[in-house]
Image (cartoon, rainbow, N blue to C red):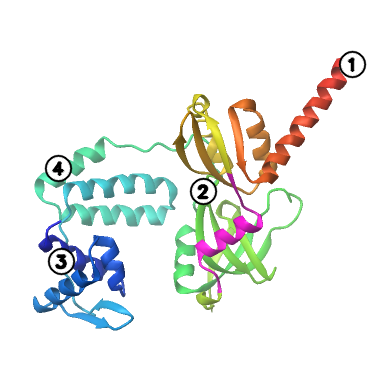
Amino acid sequence: MNRIDRLHAILVHLQSKRRVTGQEIADRFGISLRSVYRDVKALEESGVPVIGEAGIGYSIMEGYRLPPVMFTQEEAAALLMGVKLTERFTDELTRKQIENALFKIKSVLRAPDREHIEQLSDNVVVTASRLPQDEGFNKYLSDLQKAIVAGRVVHLSYHTPYREHEQDTYRDVEPFGLCYYGQAWHCFAWCRMRKDYRDFKLTRIRDLRLSEDTFYRDQHPSLQEYLGRMVRSNNEVQEVNVLFDKSVVRHLGEQKYYYGFVRQEFTGDMVRMTFLTGHPEYMAHWLFSFADLVEVETPDSMKQLILKLFNRLKKKLSTAATS
């Protein structure tokens, strides 16, 4: 990247955030802090109102805006691919906003690039999952996004499927994070009724409304901190790492998403897969069905569950053989 392109990219980066540190700019563009200082000074000399605060970072004076950004063909194509994927995992309101954003992106493209994107859009399709999804798959996703950002308390009616004969519970919760795992969106929140943090699956929310009551977001952990805490404490969600023989991976299909598939990496003749599961017993049965084609790396509790299944099956076979 030449310096002119880098100066433009730095300006776009400054406009994308409220405040940016010099080190953040250096890391993003692979330059030294000395180069960052020189580039920021060049922007100031060209008339860009950059505000620098020692020990805090840089920001752009309120009201200053760069003329419409010109995307490269590759950047626009990448955004289109992201839009195609995102449409399948959001609610109706968010899908509408995504569609509007895509129109705005197309409006600033040069004619050849716009034609490229139109043709690409007609030839890229993300099909719906073949797995059955609960009705209202992503309902309330937009409302929860607003509540998290604004720090607003949410009043919801929540249903737990294995308590069919009980009434739905009504909760006032303080949401601080959304996470997609196990083929569904989950909201992590402080439950005022239970006086503890809870994981609310969106498909189990019967009704939701934003209250006028607010809370301080800083009093709750960040989403990353909370996920790490849950994994470490084995509370509700467990991280499971397994090695699958390459010969079986292509036959897993979409069933792996039932068990909270997160990512995979190839290592020799094996494929290491990471899952986040809230139901380790069911996952143990699934892994057990692959016998010698799978190896559990962590946690030890999953290994013990599979060992129990093996001993139980061995006992049944022995009993059947002697009867």
Point out the image quarter for the N terminus.
bottom left
On the image, numbered disc 3 is attached to which residue?
A: 7
CA distance for labels 2 and 3: 43 Å
Residue 17 seen in this snapshot: yes
- The residue sitting at the bottom extreme is 54
Between discs 2 and 1, the one toward the N terminus: 2
Element type where label 4 sits in the image: helix
10 Å neighbourhood of mark 2: few (<14), some, or many (≥20)? Answer: some
Q: Is residue 111 left or right of residue 194?
A: left
Element type where label 3 sits in the image: helix
CA distance for labels 3 and 1: 80 Å
Identity of the amino acid at label 3?
Leu
Q: Residue at x 22, y 50 (%)?
A: 75
On the image, numbered disc 4 is attached to which residue?
A: 115
Give, as a single range, the part of the protein colored magenta: 220-240
Q: Is residue 106 left or right of residue 227?
A: left
Between discs 2 and 4, the one toward the N terminus: 4
Q: Which mark is residue 137?
A: 2
Point out the image quarter for the C terminus.
top right
| Residue 20 vertical placement versus 251 (above, below) | below
